[in-house]
Amino acid sequence: MTEMLVKAKYIVSNPALREKGLLTDRAMYINDAHITEIDAFHVLRAKYPDAQVIGSDNHIAVPGFIDAHNHGQGVTTIAHGTHDDQLEAWVHYWPGRSPRSAEEVHFDSLAAITRQIQSGVTTSMRHDTPSLPLEAYKTETEAITKAYELSGIRFAYALGTTDQFRLVYEDNDKFIARLPREMQAVAQELAAPIEKLSVDECLAFVQDLHTRYRHTTRINFLLGVIGPQWDSDAILTKLRDNAQALGTGMHGPLLETLYQKMYPLREFGHSAVEHFYRLGMLGRNYSAAHGVWLTEKDMDYFAASGATVIHCPSSNLRLHSGIAPVPMMLAKGVNVALGVDSEGINDNDDMLQEMRLALMLHRHPRNAFRNLDEWDVLAMATINGARAVLLEDHIGTLEVGKEADIVLVQLDRITASYLHPTVGPVAALVHHAQPRDIDFVMVAGKVIVRQGEPTQFDQRQVRATLNHIMVEVNRPAERHADALRAQLIPHIRKYYADWNVPALSPIYLMNSRS
C-alpha cells in the first residue's frame, strides 16, 4: 500500500478527550493501513519525501464515522410503499417478503453505501432478520457482502432469525380468535407458516461466515438479536452461547416502542433489560439499537455490563417511537453510539445530519440535564461506535497504532464568512458540515471517496442499474399480501390501543396540557 501523508489544519485525534484531543497544524503518516506517526507536516515531509500527500491547511481531519445501526436499503422503505407509521403497524409490511435476486440486493446495497460513504461513514453495522428459506438467505447475504467488499467500507453484519409472534406481541391463534369472523381468514393467511431458515441453520451459516472472514477487520459477522417479543428464551440463549463460542457480538433493536416496554412487564413481570440480564445477554459484546424506553434501572444494567445503546433519533421520530434519554444514559456511564437505521430525516443516510439532530433533540425545557454538545455527538459517531462494532482497538480515533479510517472535511464553507473565536472547529463541523464539504474518505489507508466521488465503483452506473432492475420488478404475491395487511392493520392498532398503559413518569417533559 502507498505510503501517505494526511495534512490538516486540525486533527481530531480522540473526541472523548474533547479539546485535549484536538491537534492543530499536524499531519499523519500512514503506512501499512495504520497511522504510524503524527507530527508537524514539515517534519514528516522531510522524513518521508516520497509519500503521497492528501489534505491541506484548509481541512479538518476526523475519525471515520460509524453508523452503528443500519439496514442498507438503497430503495427506501417509503419508496417501497411502506409509509411512516407506528412501528407495530409499519413493520408488518416487511415480514414474509419474497426473496430478492443477487443482482438486486447487490446494487441496492451499493446505492445505500454510496450515501453513507459520501457523508463520511467508514463503518456500517447492518442488521437483517429476513423471513427467508436458507438458500435465499445465503444468496442475499453473499451478494450484500460482496457489495460492501467492493465499496471499501468497513462492514459489521448482524444476521438473525425469529421464532414467535408474526402479527402482534401475542400468540397468533389467540389474537386471530378475537378478530371479527370476516378478518380471521385474512389474519390466518398472513400468519401462515412460511419456509424459513431455522435457528440452527442461521447459527451455522453465521459461524461459517465468521470463520471465512476472521482474518480481517474490514468485515465482521455478528448474531442478530431481536427483543423478547420476537425471540423466545430458547433462541436468545442459543445466540448468547454461540456469540461467546465464536468470540463475536450480538446486535439488534431493543425497547424501541412503548409496547415493547410493556410486553415483558406483562409477560415476565420485569423489564426487557432485566430479562436480558437474567439470561446473561448483557456485556461489552452486546449492542441494542434504540433504547428509547430504558428506565433508570435499565441504564444501570447497561453501564455495569458495558453494553452499548445505539441512538437512532431520525428513525424514532419517523416511527412514533419517542426520544431516547441519551443525556441521562451518558451521565450514568452508558456507552451510546449513533445510527441512522436506514430511516434518516431526508432518507439520505447522512451521518452529519444525524449528529446534528442528536445534538438538538435533547434540549430539555427545564434544564434538568446538561445538553449534549458537539463533542458528545462526535464521540457517539466515532469512538463509541467503534466499541459497538467490536473494533475499539482498531478504529474510532486518529492515534498512532490505529487503522487509518479518516474523513477530511473542507473548512471553507463551514467556517465562512465569519467564525467567532469562541466557536471551535468541531462545533463548526457538527453545526455546519454537509456531505458536499467532504473531500476524502479513507478506510484502512485506502481512499474510498475522493472529492465526493466513490473511487471503487461508478455511483451513476449503480443507480442506473438499480433503476432498471426496479422497473422490471413484479411481485404479485407481495402485492396480494399488502392488500391483506391493509385490511388487518386497523385491528392491530385496536389491539394495542386496548392495552392498559400504566402510569408513566417521563424523563423528558416537553409540553403541558394545562
Image: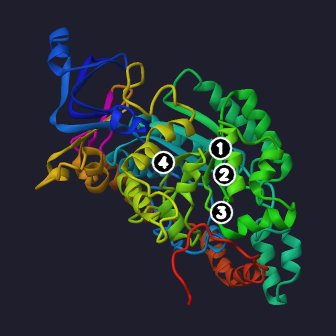
Horizontal side of 338 relative to 446 (left or right) equals right
Provide the residue designation for mark 2. 299
- Of badges 2 and 3, nearer the viewer stands 2
- Of badges 1 and 3, nearer the viewer stands 1
Q: Quadrant of the C terminus?
A: bottom right
Element at badge 3? loop
Element at badge 1? helix
Q: Residue visible at 68% across and 79% down?
A: 484
Q: Residue visible at 56% across and 40% down?
A: 388
- Location of residue 445 with respect to 359 vertically, above or below: above
Extent of the magenta region? 446-458
Provide the residue designation for mark 1. 303
Q: Amino acid at mark 1?
A: Ala
**How far across and how far down the image is residue 443, in percent?**
37, 31
- Of badges 4 and 1, nearer the viewer stands 1
Q: Residue visible at 83% across and 53% down?
A: 232
Q: Quadrant of the N terminus?
A: top left
**How far across and how far down the image is residue 143, in percent?**
52, 42
Give the Cα distance between marks 2 and 3. Answer: 10 Å
Q: Amino acid at mark 3?
A: Trp
Q: Residue 307's quadrant in the figure?
A: top right
**How far across and how far down the image is residue 471, in percent?**
42, 65
Quick one: label 2 or label 4, which is nearer the N terminus? 4
**How far across and how far down the image is residue 490, in percent?**
68, 85
Provide the residue designation for mark 4. 103
Quick one: label 3 or label 4, which is nearer the N terminus? 4
Q: Amino acid at mark 4?
A: Glu
Provide the residue designation for mark 3. 293
